[in-house]
Image (cartoon, rainbow, N blue to C red):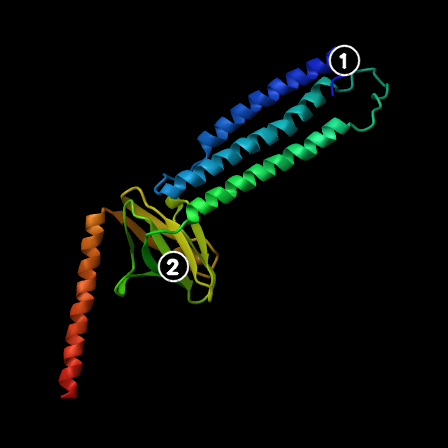
Amino acid sequence: MPTSSSDRRHFIILGVLVVIVTVLLDWLLQVGLPLPIQASIEALTIDRLIGWHLTLIAFLFALIVVPMLYIFVIFRQREGDTSDGEHFEGNAIMEVAWTVIPLILVVIFGFVGVVDLREVTKTGEELTVKVTGVQWAWSFEYEGGVLAEQLLLPVNKRVRMDLNSDNVLHSFWVPEFRVKQDLVPGYPKELYFTPTKVGEYSLNCAELCGRSHYQMTAVVRVVEQDEFTDWLATEQAKINDGKVVADADIEGTSQ
Ligand SMILES: [Cu+2]
C-alpha cells in the first residue's frame, strides 16, 4: 500500500492502466467472440452470462498482467545499481483484499448462475418432443406417435425435449439456441427452450460417441405456429387412417 507520494503515484497510474486495459480487452472479447445468432429466449440469458464472465476475465487479466509488466519496466535493475531491494514483510490489508474480493465475486456469479439456470429450466406449458439418440442418428416423436427425422418446431412456443439414449452418451446441442444437454442411457433427461426465429438450424451431437460421431446431425426447422399445427394434424391423420385400415384388416381376418 502507498507509504509515500511516489508510491501513491505508482498506484494511481496502475489503477488507470488496469481500467483502460480492462475496457479495451472486454470490448475486444465481446466484439470478437464469434457466437452464432440468438435464436431462442434462453440464448439472451446465456449470452448475458457469457458477457459478464468475459468482463470479469478481462478485469482479472488486467489486474495481474498490467502490474506485472509495469513492475518489470519501472522497477528494472539500472546499470551499475547493485543494491538490494527494500525489505518488507506481509501486508494484512492486501491479503484480506485478495481473499475477500474473489470470494464476493464467486458468490455473486454463483447466485447469478443459479438464477439464470432456474430461468432456463423453468417448466410450464410446453410442447413435448421425445428425442432419441442412437449411434449415429437422431429420431423425434410427437404427440399421437408421429415420428420424424427432422425436428420441426413452432416459433415462439416453449418446447420440452425428452431426451433418451439407446446406447452410449450423446449430447443435444443446437448452437443458436445456446442450450445443451447430455443424453444418458437409462436416465431420461429434459431440456427446455423457446425458439424465436423462423429458420433452419443444425442439431449436433456434442459428446464424442464413436466412429461416426461427427455425422450425428439432424435438421431443425423452426416454422410458424400454423404451419406446425397443419403438419402435425396431417401426420396424426395419416396414422389414424392407417389404424382404421389395420383395425378393419384385423376384423376382416377374424370373421
Ligand atoms: Cu456424438
From the viewer's perspective, tell me whether residue 98 is left or right of residue 165: right
Give the image location of residue 174, x and y in percent: 38, 48
Secondary structure found at label 2: strand
Give the image location of residue 214, x and y in percent: 42, 55
From the viewer's perspective, tell me whether residue 68 is left or right of residue 230: right
Figure quadrant, ligand 1? bottom left
- Taking depth in this image into account, of 239 and 126 the one nearest to the observer is 126
- Taking depth in this image into account, of 75 and 194 the one nearest to the observer is 194
- Taking depth in this image into account, of 212 and 74 the one nearest to the observer is 74
The residue lying furthest to the right in this view is 83
Q: Does residue 141 lie above or below 36 as drawn?
A: below
Q: Would you identify the image quadrant in which residue 17 lies?
A: top right
Give the image location of residue 105, x and y in percent: 59, 35
What's under tag 2, amino acid-wise?
Answer: Asp
The residue lying furthest to the top in this view is 5
Q: Is residue 253 visible?
A: yes
Q: Does residue 245 lie above or below 53 as drawn?
A: below
Residue behind mark 1 = 4
The quarter of the image holding the N terminus is top right
Secondary structure found at label 1: loop
From the viewer's perspective, tell me whether residue 101 is left or right of residue 123: right
